[in-house]
């Protein structure tokens, strides 16, 4: 058995040499306002630096930084994007780790774009935030290949202050999704929204109904209502963000399995088969040596 050790080490190294370069990068746009940017663990403008295991870094999870370069992703994901506020834990890392655990071998590329305190009018086509999201997404695709798998959207707290804005939310969201799909030439782009858990005003239910009722194909919704908030009563706690990340991942996996990214899932399966093949090879080699 001892003679097998070097071989064993060799095969372990081979199978652990992820990310598998044969798989295209799965790219996710993270956009919206503060609860997407992440305020988990931030109290009175100070982040507690507590990172739960679900949000740990992983060599195959990357983020597009403010200079449009891929780098290993870590909390806070939006630190160089939402620069005017103190960022903490958001849903992005928990989301990516949950996708990773589902068995995909390729790289996961996160494109953080969220800015705290923004209303949906500031994300309209032609505005600074929309154009920046578009620019970052295009750069993400060009920098090393891959395809945009979904937009993860957590926004609307700022639109719940006035009845008129809350009532205009549904129309504005539909327009934003249509414009983004057209600009990215991705007419079926999956959009996963988070229905609000909190807001800055009295018209939260109107925004939530808009989010849950959007009638566009491939736009789905997960619900954050009832999750624990920080003492500001507006921002999700770190544990709540982990929960949202997992809900987003479950929604993505459900959708990907039944719809669009069949080919990407075949890729995942191919890489799992590749690993099984390596293990088989190892066993045969060991048998031959012994
Ligand atoms: C944050 O600030 C508020 C109001 O100034 C104070 O009551 C609270 O104790 C502070 N919390 C922490 C954890 O420092
Ligand atoms: C959205 O926010 C911007 C910037 O704070 C503000 O100028 C604008 O009036 C807001 N729009 C709506 C429709 O509330
Ligand atoms: C919500 O409504 C209450 C009662 O009408 C009012 O006192 C409060 O200022 C409103 N809150 C906001 C943020 O508009």
Image (tube, rainbow, N blue to C red):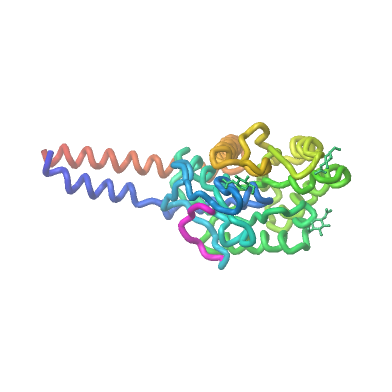
Q: Residue at x 79, y 35 (%)?
A: 205
Q: Residue at x 58, y 41 (%)?
A: 237
- Looking at the image, residue 27 lies above or below residue 279: below
Could you tell me residue 119's position as x and y percent? 76, 52
The quarter of the picture where the C terminus appears is top left
Q: Is residue 148 left or right of residue 54?
A: right
Camera-side residue: 225 or 1?
Answer: 225
Camera-side residue: 200 or 21?
Answer: 200
Camera-side residue: 202 or 179?
Answer: 202
Label count reads: 0
Q: Is residue 134 left or right of residue 164?
A: left
What span is in magenta?
A: 68-76
71 within the magenta span:
yes
56 within the magenta span:
no
Could you tell me residue 32's position as x and y percent? 68, 51
Could you tell me residue 249's position as x and y percent? 56, 39
Q: Residue at x 76, y 54 (%)?
A: 179
């Amino acid at each position: 058995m001892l003679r097998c050790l070097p071989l064993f080490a060799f095969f372990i190294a081979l199978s652990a040499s992820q990310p598998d370069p044969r798989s295209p990068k799965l790219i996710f746009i993270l956009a919206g306002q503060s609860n997407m940017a992440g305020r988990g663990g931030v109290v009175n403008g100070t982040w507690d630096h507590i990172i739960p295991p679900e949000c740990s870094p992983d060599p195959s999870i990357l983020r597009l930084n403010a200079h449009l370069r891929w780098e290993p992703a870590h909390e806070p994901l939006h630190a160089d994007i939402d620069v005017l506020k103190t960022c903490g834990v958001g849903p992005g890392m928990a989301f990516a780790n949950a996708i990773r655990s589902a068995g995909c071998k390729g790289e996961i590329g996160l494109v953080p774009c969220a800015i705290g305190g923004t209303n949906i009018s500031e994300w309209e086509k032609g505005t600074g935030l929309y154009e920046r999201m578009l620019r970052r997404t295009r750069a993400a695709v060009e920098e090393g290949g891959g395809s945009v798998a979904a937009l993860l959207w957590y926004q609307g707290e700022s639109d719940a202050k006035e009845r008129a804005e809350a009532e205009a939310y549904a129309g504005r969201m539909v327009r934003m999704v249509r414009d983004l799909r057209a600009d990215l030439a991705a007419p079926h782009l999956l959009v996963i929204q988070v229905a609000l858990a909190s807001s800055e005003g009295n018209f939260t239910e109107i925004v939530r109904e808009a989010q849950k009722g959007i009638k566009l194909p491939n736009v789905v919704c997960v619900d954050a209502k009832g999750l624990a908030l920080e003492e500001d009563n507006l921002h999700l706690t770190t544990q709540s963000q982990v929960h949202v990340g997992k809900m987003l991942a479950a929604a993505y996996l459900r959708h990907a399995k039944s719809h669009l990214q069949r080919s990407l899932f075949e890729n995942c399966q191919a890489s799992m088969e590749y690993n099984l093949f390596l293990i088989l090879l190892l066993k045969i080699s060991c048998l031959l040596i012994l």
